[in-house]
Image (cartoon, rainbow, N blue to C red):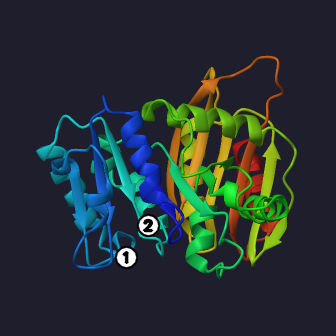
Amino acid sequence: MIVTGFLGAGKTTFINHLLLQNKGVKIGLIENEFGDVSIDSKLFTDYQPESILELNNGCICCSIFNEFSLALQELVKKHDHLEQLIIETTGIADPGSIIELFYRDIDLVRLFEFSGTICLVDSVNFQDQSLGFEQQKQILLSDLIILNKVNKSDTKRLKDIHRIVSSLNKTATIVEANYADIDLAQLYILQPQLQEDFIRKIRKPIYSEHDANEFHSFTIRFGGYLNENSFREWFRYFASIHKKDIYRIKGIVHFKSSPLLWIVQAVAGSVLITEGSVINPFESLENVLVFIGKEISKFEIEKEIQQYILQEN
C-alpha cells in the first residue's frame, strides 16, 4: 500500500490509525523524507521501530529503481514475518514511479501483492494551495482518496473539492474524514473493497471527456470476449507506446473461458492484469477502459482499440 498526499494533509496521522487498528498484523513501513534527519518515525505510536525503513535525504520517487527494489528485498529478508507493507511518500512526490515498480519489477511482483494507493487531501487548505503537477498526479494515480479535516471546512468548499478531485480521478473511491480516521478494520481487505467499488463504479455510464488543468479523462466501452494471451500482448505494447501521455489506465475486461472479470491497470507504461470477481450472468457483457492523461485524444485511442478488435476477429 502506498500512502501519498500533499504537505500537511494527514499522512502520518492516517498511518498511525492503521497501525493502531491492526496491532495483530506485522507491518513494515517505508518512511521517506527529504532531510538527513528523520522525525516522522518518532511520531508513530506503539510500533516496533525495527520494522521501519527510513529513506532520508532524497525522494524515493526520483531514486534509481534497482536501489529501491533492493532496499525492499533486504527489508523482507530481515523481517520475513511481515504481512503488510506501507510506503509513505513525501508530500511533494509524484508516486507514479513507485507504483510502476510493483507492476514491472519481477522481484517485487513475486514478493508483494500491490493493494493500491491512498491519497490524503487537506480539505481546509486544498483550494488555497497551488494545484501543481505533483499534487494532481497524487490524485490521478490513487485508488482511495480521503478528504481530511472536513469538520473544519464548510459545505460549499467541500462540494467544490469533491468536484475538482472527481474531475481528475473519476474511478477512485472518495471518503470524508476527520483526523485522517476512517474505518478500515483490517489492511488485507483494502484491495477487495477498492476492487468491488471500482467495478461497481465503472459500470455506471458517468464518464465523459473532460479537461481539468490540461488532464483528460474518458472511457471506452466495447463488447465481446477477448483472447487473454493476445490481449495481454497488445495491451502491454499499447501502454508502452503511450506511457508519456497516458498516466493511468484502469478497466475491466472479459477473457474467453474465464468465469471471472479481469482488472486491467497501467501506470507509466507498466501493466498489471489481475483476477476480479465472478461474472454476474445477469449483467451485460461489456469491456470498459478508463484513460487519464495529458493531451490524449479519445478518437485516436478508440481507433487503436477498434483496430485491435478487428485484427482479433
Q: Which residue is mark 2?
A: 97
Q: CA–CA distance between discs 2 and 1?
A: 8 Å
Along the viewing direction, whichever of 153 and 148 lies nearer the viewer: 153
Task: Determine the residue positioned at 56% across, 57% down.
Answer: 119
Task: Determine the residue positioned at 31% across, 48% down.
Answer: 45
- In this view of the protein, can residue 165 be seen by the observer? yes
Q: Quadrant of the C terminus?
A: top right
Please state which amino acid type lies under the numbered disc 2: Ser
Which mark, residue 182? none
Q: Earlier in the sequence, mark 2 or mark 1?
A: 1
Task: Determine the residue positioned at 22% across, 79% down.
Answer: 36
Q: Are marks 2 and 1 in contact (CB under 8 Å)?
A: yes
Please state which amino acid type lies under the numbered disc 1: Cys
Above or below, 129 against 168 in this view is below
Instruction: Mark 2: give few (<14), some (14-19) or many (20+) Cα within 10 Å.
Output: some
Q: Is residue 212 left or right of residue 123?
A: right
Where residue 168 sits in the image (x, y, percent)? 72, 64
Q: Which residue is mark 1?
A: 62
Q: Residue 54 lies in what quarter of the image? A: bottom left
- Which residue of the protein is positioned furthest toward the top in this rendering? 281
Q: Residue 124 lies in what quarter of the image? A: bottom right
Exactly how many numbered labels are in the figure? 2
